[in-house]
């Protein structure tokens, strides 16, 4: 029987689990939220000492250092990062992607045993419609019409080109390894028979499909409903110790239930609709029922997320990607309504253990030292 921890653990406690989850950033959306010190969305899953990152929101790097997941030592911090998964191409999920690209050289290139694999959605394939076009005084000009909706591989190429001076300098002047050898980039291709249309009606029902597998983890993806952003994915990580699902950004969506079935942990985005109401509800200074509906279709409210997790039958629901980041915890806790499992409101640097922890050593030193870890250390 699994003893997956349903409650957050200290980093020390979590390090006794072969599979663990660490929230590196729990804030959603591009705004800076007054009074909140949550970093932008980022999650780490560590299995047998290898770390997999999901989304790279603002401030993931400092949080990663604080988490203790990487080894200490000069230029070694990212040695254990094995793969990175981007759920979708909204800026709050990848604004600090360049940090990984450019700093990996200086914080991991000494110890990388293989390239870091980076996977993310492919090209959208078509521009999204202009929302409320009939009400717009000026229609926006397409930005970079030659390729206005690039996927992960092309976006990365363009980012690297922007930093060409630094990249050439480090390779020529500092004899750094070719940056292209440190990473392997991949667009997540949709299975051929999904019938998905970037500008079509709701996300079609589909089965999760495998996008990555190694000796530690099998990762599957499914389309979720975050229109007009497309493709937008949820990911499921299955390890020998249990399973974790990350919703990405989504409205209520049957595919999310499907990929979450029986998972130990579901990390789900959440939006406080009272905040939206205050911005554009009927009593706000600028009422806009259409935009309100539009936002709710792309996100999951406090009232909706519990039933969503209940339908999936998950044991623990962890709220993350909180919009706005400064809504009080007591309000997020209302997500328990309609969910019979354990609800945790995510905080940066929270840890969860998956499966069974390694046994504690029987004798605990009495001189104040921490007992020696008996599991594979995460860092
Ligand atoms: Zn988004």
Image (tube, rainbow, N blue to C red):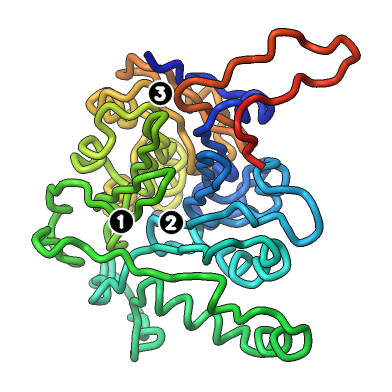
* Residue under the image location 38 percent in, 29 percent down: 242
Q: Which residue is mark 2?
A: 85
- Mark 2 or mark 1: whose residue is earlier in sequence: 2
Q: Nearer the viewer, mark 3 or mark 1?
A: 1
Q: Give the residue at x 33% y 76%.
A: 149
Dot 2 and dot 1 residues touching (CB under 8 Å): yes
Real-space Cα distance between discs 2 and 1?
Answer: 10 Å
Q: Is mark 1 within 8 Å of ligand 1?
A: no
- Choose between 37 and 161: the one closer to the eye: 161
Secondary structure type for disc 1: strand
- Mark 2 surroundings: few (<14), some (14-19) or many (≥20) residues within 10 A: many
Give coordinates of residue 43: x percent, y percent.
52, 45
242 horizontally vs 177: left or right? left
Residue 364 appears in the picture as rendered: yes
* Callout 2 touching callout 3 (CB < 8 Å): no
Residue designated by label 1: 211
Q: Label 2, label 3: how many angstroms apart (C-alpha)?
A: 22 Å
Of marks 2 and 1, the one in the foreground:
1
For the C terminus, give its image quadrant.
top right
Observer-nearest of 236 and 246: 236
Above or below, 191 relative to 174: above
Q: On the image, which quarter does residue 264 sit in?
A: top left
Quadrant in which the N terminus is drawn: top left
Image-quarter location of ligand 1: bottom left
- Circle number at residue 316: 3
Is the residue marked 2 within 8 Å of ligand 1, measured from its CB? no
The disc, 2 or 3, on the residue closer to the chain's N-terminal end is: 2
SS under mark 3 = strand
Q: Residue at x 49, y 24 (%)?
A: 344
Residue 4 % position (x, y):
45, 21
Q: In the displayed structure, would residue 264 be above or below residue 29? A: above
């Amino acid at each position: 029987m699994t003893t997956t921890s349903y409650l957050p653990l200290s980093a020390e406690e979590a390090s006794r689990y072969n599979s663990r989850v660490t929230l590196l950033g729990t804030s959603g959306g591009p705004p800076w939220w007054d009074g909140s010190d949550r970093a932008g969305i980022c999650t780490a899953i560590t299995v047998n000492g290898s770390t997999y990152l999901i989304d790279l929101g603002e401030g993931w790097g400092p949080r990663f250092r604080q988490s203790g997941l990487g080894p200490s030592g000069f230029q070694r911090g990212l040695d254990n990062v094995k793969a990175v998964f981007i759920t979708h191409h909204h800026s709050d999920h990848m604004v600090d992607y360049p940090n990984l690209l450019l700093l990996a050289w200086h914080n991991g290139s000494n110890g990388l045993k293989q390239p870091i694999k980076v996977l993310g959605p492919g090209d959208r394939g078509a521009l999204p419609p202009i929302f409320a076009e009939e009400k717009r005084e000026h229609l926006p000009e397409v930005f970079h019409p030659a390729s206005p909706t690039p996927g992960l591989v092309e976006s990365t190429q363009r980012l690297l080109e922007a930093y060409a001076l630094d990249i050439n300098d480090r390779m020529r002047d500092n004899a750094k390894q070719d940056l292209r050898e440190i990473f392997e980039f991949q667009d997540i291709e949709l299975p051929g028979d999904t019938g998905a249309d970037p500008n079509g009606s709701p996300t079609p029902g589909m089965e999760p499909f495998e996008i990555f597998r190694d000796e530690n983890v099998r990762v599957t993806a499914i389309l979720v409903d975050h229109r007009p952003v497309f493709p937008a994915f949820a990911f499921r990580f299955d390890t020998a110790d249990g399973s974790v699902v990350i919703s990405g950004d989504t409205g209520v969506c049957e595919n999310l239930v499907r990929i979450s079935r029986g998972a130990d942990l579901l990390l789900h985005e959440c939006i406080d609709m009272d905040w939206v109401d205050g911005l554009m509800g009927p009593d706000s200074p600028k009422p806009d029922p259409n935009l309100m509906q539009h936002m709710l279709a792309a996100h999951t409210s406090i009232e909706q997320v519990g039933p969503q997790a209940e339908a999936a039958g998950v044991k623990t629901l962890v709220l993350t990607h909180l919009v706005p980041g400064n809504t009080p915890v007591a309000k997020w806790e209302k997500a328990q309504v309609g969910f019979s499992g354990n609800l945790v409101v995510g905080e940066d640097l929270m840890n969860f253990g998956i499966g069974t922890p390694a046994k504690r050593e029987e004798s605990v030193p009495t001189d104040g030292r921490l007992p020696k870890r008996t599991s594979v250390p995460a860092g």
